[in-house]
Image (spheres, rainbow, N blue to C red):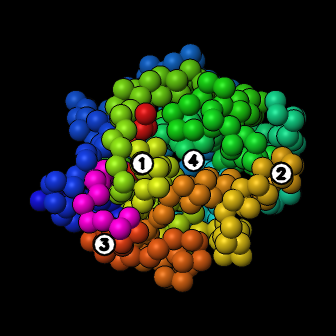
Amino acid sequence: MTNIKLPYGQGYLEAEIPDERVAGILVSDMHHYKPAETQVEIVRKAMENPIGTPRLREIAKGKKKVVVIASDHTRPVPSKVIMPLMLEEIRKGNPDADITILISTGCHRGTTEAELLSKFGPEIMASEKIYVHDCDDESMLVNIGTLPSGGELIINRLAVEADLLVSEGFIEPHFFAGYSGGRKSVLPGIASRKTVMFNHNATFIDSDRSRTGIVDGNPIHRDMLYAARAARLDFIVNVVINSDKEAIFAVAGDCDLAHIEGRNFLNSQCKVSRIPADIAITTNAGYPLDQNIYQAVKGMTAAEATLNEGGVIIIAAKSNDGHGGEGFYKSFSEEQDVSKMMAEFLATPSEDTIPDQWQSQIFARILKNFKVVYVSEAPDNIVEDLHMIPAHSIEEAIRKADEILGKSDAKITVIPDGVSVIVL
């Protein structure tokens, strides 16, 4: 028997699969990568050797208002490692800098005090100014121009008024922006809902360039990079993390050039060749990425890339926060015909994009081609309303997949971390 261990919430699910059924296991080499230095040493070294810019301490000289964009509660960025080093470096260049940490929630809910404490620790919480971005707070939003696609670029006022704008983040495969990190700190991170909606429009999402691991010709990436430049994002510190959410590689410097270096490292570790099978088991990498069904669509795209036509996706995502998006949920609970949904998405003008439409569009694409068995703690009725089949263990999910396929010997490809691999 082959034992599989899948990230699930803050723990793991384990299951045994007969050896003869396992087609293969797709695992990022990153999980086996063992850096020679500690996380602090890795980040510090990157900051001492920035790509395309002077050191942050030099950039900070003479800059009164400094804004550091930080990720929110949905991203496993090791901020306890990165943020103290960034703050130290800024103050070495400018001891009197007026620093604000701006939480880049995008269109997510606001990050709670408890989540901020978990993210930064008590010292930063007690001593630093922290502001949580709200994409709907008109009083805190400023229009700074037009994106290449024609959308309005509206971002947080604190970033616009800053003398120096920098960001922390992490780089991982992203299912329509190509990669996370870098320029995404601005768009969608601190952008208005209107700007995010336009950037995530149906035509862009439908592009075959808007896929995991692709930036060349990716219209979503193009707008995001333009937004970062327009906002004067002068310096980034981005890390690549392993399955334990620890930094194993870091880059610092220019928001594009440093990001490219990070992507190159990620590609060297994360690209895997598809292993065709009738069943694919995947995850959304555990906490914090598997808190809801909405986010778990990302992990499904890895399974989508390896499955045979008409196959079954099994995804394990704890989803203790439920569906994760009201618009996303209603789109599926109120319409049973996913082909009709797709047609409606594609007919929607960019400026009329609605919240969660992009996620719904990608999810509909998956549901058109595959059955999905969902292992979670979400209520069964919510899972069923979202056109999926609920299960509460991997063993139960495999039994249900076998019933769907009408056979008990279908080959299975396992993807323990569905957001860390780029399936070719």
Residue 270: in sight, yes or no? Answer: no
Q: Which mark is residue 70?
A: 4
The span from disc 2 to disc 3 (Cα, nearest Å) is: 39 Å
Foreground residue among 282 and 246: 282
What residue lies at 54% left-to-right and 55% top-to-bottom? 369
Q: Amino acid at mark 4?
A: Ala
- Judged by depth in the image, the label closer to the viewer, 1 or 2, is 1
Whole-angstrom CA distance, mark 1 to mark 2, is 29 Å
Q: Say which residue label 3 marks.
A: 399
Q: Residue furthest left?
A: 1
The residue sitting at 52% across, 38% down in the picture is 212
Which residue in the structure is indicated by mark 1? Answer: 308
Q: Secondary structure at mark 2?
A: loop
Asked if the magenta segment contains residue 107, the reply would be no
> Which contiguous range is marked in magenta?
405-417
Which comes sooner in the sequence, label 2 or label 4?
Answer: 4
Residue at which label 2 appears: 347
